[in-house]
Amino acid sequence: MGYAIQSRSTTEPILFLLILSSDNITGATGKTPTVTISKNGAAFAVPAGSVTELSSGWYKIAPNASDNGTLGPLLLHADATGCDPCDDQFDIVDFNPL
């Protein structure tokens, strides 16, 4: 589901969906996910941008130039108690994809 993000953008958040493991369908609300990212094949680390809930199981990492400043694939892994793990890939590019 990932999408392209302009390198060093401070306007476009990284979005992800957490699903309850009890039914593998329902969006998980009220969770505090543990999130790590890998920038262009580097080791996974905690993102600099804060993680907040939007609604209906959707969460976001706030736009941060240190999180999206490396061109190439950005891998995301998110997990929370009672949820299926979420893994996604985003493409960090040197142009505005919007």
Image (cartoon, grey):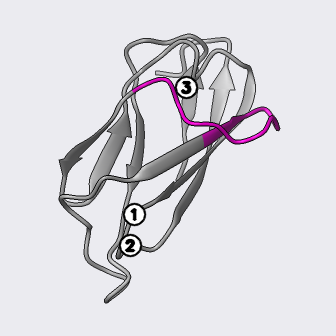
Task: Say if 88 sits above or below 6 in the image.
Answer: below
Q: Circle 2 sits in a helix, a strand or a loop, which is it? A: loop
Find residue 13 and report its horizontal and vertical position in percent. Answer: 39, 29
Q: Are marks 2 and 1 in contact (CB under 8 Å)?
A: yes
| Residue receiving disc 3 | 5
Q: Which of marks 3 and 1 is in front?
A: 1
Where on the picture, by quarter, is residue 23? Answer: bottom left
Between 32 and 57, which is closer to the camera in this rendering? Answer: 32
Where residue 84 sits: x, y (%)? 45, 74
- Badge 3 marks a residue whose secondary structure is strand
Q: Locate residue 97, reporting x and y percent.
A: 54, 21
Q: How far apart are marks 3 and 2 (CA)?
A: 26 Å
Which amino acid type corresponds to the residue marked 3 in the rendered image? Answer: Ile
Q: Residues within 10 Å of mark 1 (few under 14, many from 20)?
A: some
Q: Quadrant of residue 8?
A: top right
Residue type, numbered disc 2: Cys
Mark 2–mark 1 distance (CA, rounded to whole Å): 5 Å
For the record, the magenta segment spans 37-49
Helix, strand or loop at disc 1? Answer: loop
**Mark 2 — residue?**
83
Tell me: 62 left or right of 79.
left
Considering every residue shown, the one lying at the far right of the view is 41
Vertical order, 95 against 47 (above or below): above
Q: Name which of mark 3 and mark 1 comes first in the sequence.
A: 3
Reply yes or no: does residue 43 show up in magenta. yes
Instruction: Give me the C-alpha separation between circle 3 and circle 1.
Output: 25 Å
Magenta highlight on residue 24: no
